[in-house]
Structure formats: structure tokens, C-alpha cells
Image: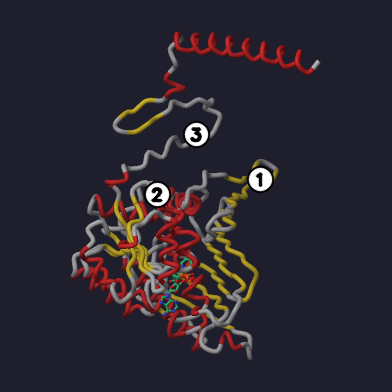
Amino acid sequence: MAGTNLINRRGALIGAAGATGTLLAGAAAAAVPEIDTGRVQGGQVEFPAWTAPTERPSGGPPNPMPVSERVGFAVVGLGRLTLEEVLPAFGEAKRSRLVALVSGTPDKAARVAAQYGLRPEAVYDYAGFDRIRDNPEIRAVYIVLPNSLHKEYTIRAAQAGKDVLCEKPMAMSSAEGQAMVDACRAAGRKLMIAYRCQYEPYNREVLRMVREATFGPARFIDAVNVQNQGDGAQWRFKRALAGGGSLPDVGLYCLNAARYLTGEEPVEVFARSVSPPGDPRYAEVEESVTFMLRFPGGVVANCATSYGMHESRLLRVHTPGAAISLDGAFSYHDKQLRITRREGRAEAVEERRIPMLNQFALELDHMAECILSNREPHTPGEEGVQDHRIMEAIYQSAASGQPVALPRVEGLDRTRGPAPSS
Ligand code: NAD
């Protein structure tokens, strides 16, 4: 019986092969429609829409630049942000590529270099950092070090002839930040601060609705960025390394959001700061800060930040016609955008889903585009200096219990370069 089955199966297989041959011959004879094959136009691979106009467009192939034409980045500091977000983001970047690493930990650096296909010569240590000058593949340096080291490595990178992308907060104070701006200008190099949310599609959609006054002018902004911080040994609890506690680390996102949504600079701040008494983690830096910003156009922003509360990252804009609410506004990934407004006799709650794009890849590519086209970054050093000035006023208000006035700045977006193209 088994033998018969085998013969039968073979027979069936031969039959199937014959049928397949017929199908292939038929396919070769028919022209494949362009909608299936796509085409190359202006150096880009394109596919015509294959879904009906009722469906969201897919966005198409990313069409990255050829690798050899992309801007080469050296990433300085192999900590969590670098390993968990920045290096993977190069895989989604279109104009940027990773060409070097800087680390003080040789075995980690060697391992990471191997993981990302870098040669051992592309790994630098801090003492040998200035040798990046001799590596023409490195056009930009991305500084992802503890805050106290941003100034030194920004200035050394600029003096080595490289453009600089620096993590937030840009420095320990506005004076340090200004020194970084001045040093980069003197060296003829660009300086961009890594305000990723200003490149992220959900935040940009809220920005669009606020600037176009889609539901009327913004009146109040609520911004919350809190997280529950763990072990006390980390640099974030040391004033000499961090410059402050939750405010410069995560509260900065609330402050920066209120500024980029309105485009204005606050004329007054009022703040309170609290830390749990006796908790050694808060011997040098604060746990929580709430602060109010008053903008010249009439918007008031209420902001709260903390190292002692379960993660919550919320941005809400109140306008006469609708409440715009972005949950996860400052997160790396999950976001939920809701618009609540009247719909006849009902209150409509509309959720808007926007294709998620990697915000680290977007900011890397913005920096690369600015280098390639010699443009000023959207978030240059001046944007970071202004945040430091306001944080200094926030600390002053929290210490005195009094509101602190800030100089009036005329016009919109005075510390920003042209908006990102994508
Ligand atoms: P981390 O502690 O995980 O990494 C810091 C790295 O710096 C480590 O590899 C460490 O070895 C190295 N380092 C070099 N000299 C050091 C020193 N003297 N003391 C301590 N570490 C030293 O920190 P992180 O979370 O990656 O943060 C790095 C920077 O990135 C900070 O400025 C932070 O504010 C910023 N950051 C930004 C985001 C964002 O979403 N944009 C998120 C997290 C962190």
C-alpha cells in the first residue's frame, strides 16, 4: 500500500509541476501592470496607489539616499538612549548613517561596533576624541552624554570641524549654552539640540491645529511629564552631572512644548518645587516641579514634572471650539490624539491616527538635511539657551515663591530655524 501511495504522490507532484510551468509561461506572456511593478522616477521608486481614495495612503517606499551620500554621524556615549533608541533609528534614517562611536568602555564599544558593522578604527575613546578631526567620514557628532559633559564635547567637536547634534538639556545653564552657541559659530559649525518632539508627527499635528487656530485660538495648555525614577546611584541625582532634577530632564518637554505650540516666549513664570523630605535621592536635585507660564498673546500653560510619579506624558490644548489632547505626547512610541467638540446635540470624541515615524530618525535626518543644504536647524542652540533661561526663572520663582518676569520677545519662533520638511 505504501508503495502505491508513493507512486501516486509522485504522479501528483509531476502533475503539479506541469501546472506550475503553464502558469509561469502564461504570466511571462501577460504585461505586468505598473501598479504592481512600480517605477523609478527622478531617482525615486514609486508605486501608484492600490487602495481606494477612502483609505489612508501608505506613505510609499522610504527612498533613502544612497549610503555613500548620507551624512556620517559619530555618536558619543553608549548609554541607554544611544543603545535603545539612537543606534536602531539609523536603520530607519534616510539621509544619515552611523560611521563612528565614542565610548570609555572598550568591551562595550567593540561589541556595539560589531553589532552595527563598524570597523575597530571607527571607535574612539574620550582621550582620543579630537582624532575625529582626521576622519572625513564623520561630518556630524551626536552627543548623548550626561548633561555636564555636553558643553565640553560640543566645543571639542566643533573645533574638530564637525557639526553638532546635542541631547537636551543642552547644558547646565544658559551661560554654558550660550558658550556652546558662540563656540560653534566661531568654528563655523552647526549646532542643533535634539528636541525630538518638534520633529514627531503627532506633536506637529497639534502644532498645526494650534497655529492655524483650527478650533479657535489656544487659551490654556496643560503639559504633564512625570515618571517614577529608581536607583539613587545614577547621574540624574547628582547636581554636578545633571544640573537639576526632573525639571531639566523631563519637565523641559512641557516647557518646550508650550513654547513651540504658541511660537511665543513667556513673559512671566510662577513655580513650586517639592521633594519628599528625607529621601537621599533628592539631597541634591528636586523631585517635582509645577510651573505656570504666561505668554504675551494670552495663553497660559500649566506644567507639571516629577521623578516620583507613575509615567504620564500628556499635552492638552484648550480652545473655544475643542479640546485637543495628546496622550503620550513626550513618549518614544505610543501616542493617542483626541479632539473633543460639539457635534449637533452630542459631544464628539474623535481619535486621529497618524502613521508613526521614528522621531529619532526624523531628527537625525533633519540635521543631515541642514548639513547637506547648508540650512539652519529648526532647533538650533538658541532654542536650548532660551529653555535654560526660562528654567532659571522657574527655579528662581520656586525658591522665592514669587512670580518672575521675563523679557518680552516680539514675533514668533525667534529661536527656531525653518520648519522641518518631513
Ligand atoms: P545613560 O546614563 O544611560 O548614558 C550615559 C552614558 O554616558 C553612559 O554610557 C556612560 O558610560 C557615559 N558617561 C561618560 N562619562 C560619564 C560620566 N562622567 N558619568 C556618567 N556617565 C558617563 O544616560 P542616557 O539616558 O542615555 O542620557 C544621556 C543624555 O541623553 C542626557 O543628556 C539625557 O538628558 C539625554 N536623554 C534624552 C532623551 C530623549 O528622549 N531625547 C532620553 C533620554 C536621555
Residue 393, by quadrant, is bottom left
How busy is the neighbourhood of tag 2: few (under 14 within 10 Å), some, or many (20 plus)? many
Which residue position is annotated with label 3? 57
Q: Secondary structure at mark 2?
A: loop
Q: CA distance from mark 1 to mark 3?
A: 25 Å
User: What label sits on residue 228 in the rendered view?
Assistant: none
Task: Mark yes or no: residue 121 visible.
Answer: yes
**Closer to viewer: mark 1 or mark 2:** 2
Where is residue 124 shown, x and y percent of the image?
32, 68
Question: Which quadrant of the rendered structure holds the N terminus?
Answer: top right
SS under mark 1: strand
Q: Which mark is residue 348?
A: 1
- Mark 1 or 3, which is nearer the eye? 3
Location of mark 2 (residue): 93
Q: CA distance from mark 2 to mark 3?
A: 20 Å
User: Is residue 266 something that shows in the picture?
Assistant: no
Q: Are marks 1 and 3 in contact (CB under 8 Å)?
A: no
| Alpha carbons under labels 1 and 2: distance apart | 37 Å
| Residue under the point 43% across and 36% down | 61
Looking at numbered disc 2 in the image, what kind of residue is underneath it?
Answer: Ala
Tell me which corner region of the image, top left, top right, bottom left or bottom right, holds residue 10. Answer: top right
Tell me which label, 1 or 3, sits earlier in the chain. Answer: 3
Q: Quadrant of residue 23?
A: top right
Q: Height in image: 419 above or below 148? A: above
Disc 3, SS: loop
Q: Amino acid at mark 3?
A: Pro
- Chain-order first, disc 1 or disc 2: 2
Q: Residues within 10 Å of mark 3 (few under 14, many from 20)?
A: few
Q: Position of residue 371 (x, y in %)?
A: 26, 54
